[in-house]
Amino acid sequence: MLFPNSVPSPAGWQLFRWLFDPLTFLDQCTDRWGSTFSLGLVTGLRMTLVADPEAIADVFSLDPNQIESGSMNYLLEPLVGLNSLLLLDGNPHRRHRKLLLPPFHGERMTAYGRLICDLTRQQAADWGSQKVIAGRKVTQVITLKTILKAVFGLVDGDRYGQIQVLAAKILDLLGSPFTSSLLFLPSLQRDWGPWSPWGYFLKLRNQLDVLLYGEIADRRAEQVQAQQDAAQPNPATNRGPSDRTDILSLLLAARDEAGQPMSDEEIRDELMTLLLAGHETTATSLAWALWWVTQFPAMGDRIRAEIAELGPDPEPMAIAKLPYLNAFCQETLRLYPVALIGSPRRLLKPTTIGRYDYPAGAIVSPNIYSAHRRPDLYPNPTQFQPERFLERSFSNSEFLTFGGGNRSCIGMAFAQFEMKLVLATLLMDWSVAYAGVLPPRPARRGVTVGPDGPLRLRMTRRDRVAPAPVPKPQTVA
């Protein structure tokens, strides 16, 4: 049997590198041990990372009945709960996935498009002709508001404001390599009162739970009222709540094959997953996209010219289909993926993946970051070149920002849709320049990776005129 190389350094040192300098760590491991190697981030437990497309394709095609994946994400349980799609396996995972997929596809996306554009413009409404902003903070606010309105169906009010504040506090609390260790080291998860880091996290989470369960209860009451109104129509009292198209309402109305609804606890955990995982990842990718616009202004002009061809008031769905805008966003996601690795799989029987043989119990995970930097797939892989996504198509095992197989991200279409619309809306109205001193570096933010600082950007208002077409920009190292 052929086994992959194992990184020989102590588990504690590997975990330290994984927390505080993960990209350099992965680069060094790949340079020394190739596209497949095993890490020992926890004493006695090894995980093999694969960055070879054939091996990744093998991982994505594994029989779901022959692997455990949800249990490998146990570090996320304090954030999203045991009923989260991320932590489920087997029939519960299939049930949740089937119930959660429909709201993120089809005609409902059209309704969300105008909302995303409107929220973006509202956020920029008071910037004046020039404004220096904290780019990552602004994108977080926009994506969080999108989640609260499109997913939760909330309108401005006390509950909306409180959920927004609490979610932001939780993400900020876990937003550095030091506080991220609370998730990676369960031994640090000790509640020593509200002033201790973990105690403060639990306090915020409990406050958020009260609001989420309150919203679920109110929405269930609305649906009961809607059923009564439908049975006995009365124009004087019918409030028409059944017209809601937000994802929470759709989840409350969803039924599985046995006709059973999701429980309050299941819906709460899936809402937490979308709230804490969904908006932060898109916000980080948007922040990187704005950074790349500051480095390659001609690329921003090319996006504007592409949008201008759609007319003075383009439809969101038309914007989302623009080829260069799509390529620009894909290259952003390639170069600095928010998740460095895909969902780990624990093998339940001996399995061959790529050219290696693994025993039952082995843990294998796609190495997204390293796969995206293979020079045979992406020539000059450290350079930002959106044109590569216009010149060829990449398979799911070559470009895998959103994972694959039965663990692919259910919010993939929504996340890309939102990213393109927010970026396009900002570029139509604003020119972007970097106002910081040092360029941003990727750094640990909880279980994800994003810019290490606020990403200070100078936003200058543009006249809404159609820009002249610009030549294809030259690649700059």
Image (tube, grey):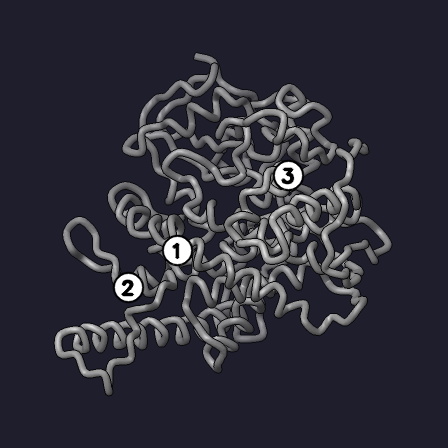
Give residue 414's position: percent from left, percent from top: 47, 50
- Residue beneath the point at 64% across and 37% down: 331
Instruction: State which mark lies toward you, 3 or 2.
Output: 3
For disc 1, the neighbor class at 10 Å (few under 14, some 14 to 19, many from 20) is some
Name the residue carrying label 2: 252
Name the residue carrying label 3: 324
Secondary structure at badge 3 equals: helix
Mark 2 or 1 closer to N-term? 1
- Residue 25: tell me if it is visible: yes
Name the residue at the front extreme: 311
Q: Is residue 138 left or right of residue 49?
A: right
Q: Nearer the viewer, residue 220 or 176?
A: 220
Instruction: State which mark lies toward you, 2 or 1.
Output: 1
Q: Is residue 444 left or right of residue 265?
A: right
Report how far apart the C-alphas of labels 2 and 1 lie in the structure: 16 Å
Q: In which quadrant of the rendered view does residue 336 lie?
A: top right
Q: In which quadrant of the rendered view does residue 333 lie?
A: top right
Indicate the amino acid at tag 2.
Answer: Leu
Q: Quadrant of the N terminus?
A: top left
Mark 3 or 2 closer to N-term? 2
Name the residue carrying label 1: 108
Give residue 458's position: percent from left, percent from top: 80, 60
- Residue beneath the point at 66% across and 37% down: 335
Q: Nearer the viewer, residue 358 or 95?
A: 95
Report how far apart the C-alphas of labels 3 and 2 lie in the structure: 38 Å
Secondary structure at badge 2 equals: helix
For disc 2, the neighbor class at 10 Å (few under 14, some 14 to 19, many from 20) is some
User: Up-down: is 263 above or below 351?
Assistant: below
Q: Are marks 3 and 1 in contact (CB under 8 Å)?
A: no
